[in-house]
Amino acid sequence: MENNKKVMSTDVKRLCGMAIFVALAVVATILTKWLQIAHLTFDAKDAVITIAAYIYGPLPALAMSLATSMIESLTFGGDTGWFGFLMNFFSTAAFSLTASIIYMKKRDINGALIGLLTATVVTTGVMLLLNVFIAPLYFGLPLFAPYIMNMLPTLLLPFNFAKALMNSAIAMYLYKPVLAALREAKLIEGSAKNMLTFNRNSKIILFTGIIVIAVSAAIFLILLNAQTA
């Protein structure tokens, strides 16, 4: 009986933690959706769900990606309908699943960074494929329509790559503070003591994040200038 109560308590804490991350992802989307280039908008929900994926694993990340995309689609997702929902879901799912699967196999700073780098490449590729094969259905265009194909190298590829890079940097910087906060709140096991000390790993994250932010910001600026030219 005591073991059953302990399992139930752990499951409740896990569900509460996942619900918090879904709420944070929705808030992050609202707060960061100000950057728009052509019909594409940046948001930071991929980073939030990826942090959750590092804590809870790939399958919960899939569920949280679905829940977040559904909430966005039914509330402030605009008029893109099923297409917007599909693009949001696959972007978040591809990023968080890829990063967390790699991190599960190598749970250290190298695994986390390799996971984020790989997730950036995979997510960019997935979004390009969706634009090539799914976008024509939504816009009523033939497959490989010049309108879409011409945007691949000049807009879709660099934007999605820069978006994934920026989400990588956000996930890098927020992972330990969020993990410490959840441990302090007793929502996950472990001690928050000494988690936020500035050590060798912190330096790696700091400098890597600076480089990633600089590269992604430069790409966004180039795209913005190209749109206004």
Image: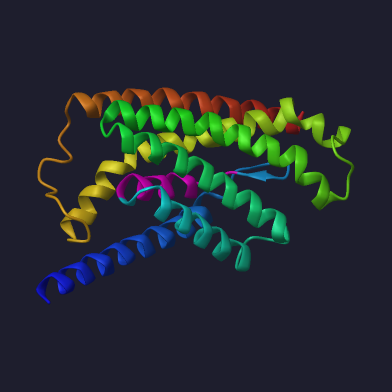
Q: Report if residue 49 lies within the magenta region.
A: yes
Image coordinates of residue 156 in percent, x first then y, are: 69, 34
Residue depicted at 10% across the width and 74% down the height: 2
Give the main secondary structure of the magenta stretch: helix
**Vertical placement of 67 versus 40: above or below?**
below
Image coordinates of residue 205 in percent, x first then y, are: 31, 28
Q: Is residue 13 left or right of residue 98?
A: left
Q: Give residue 81's quadrant in the image.
A: bottom right
Q: Look at the image and give the residue range highlighted in magenta.
A: 42-55
Q: How many marks?
A: 0
Q: Give residue 85's quadrant in the image.
A: bottom right
State the colouring used for the structure image: rainbow
Residue depicted at 46% across the width and 38% down the height: 98
Q: Is residue 124 left or right of residue 130?
A: left
Q: Is residue 49 left or right of residue 140?
A: left
Q: Report if residue 48 lies within the magenta region.
A: yes
Can the viewer see residue 165 in this picture?
no
Residue depicted at 71% across the width and 31% down the height: 155
Observer-nearest of 211 and 136: 136
Residue depicted at 40% across the width and 32% down the height: 115
**Vertical placement of 96 versus 144: above or below?**
below
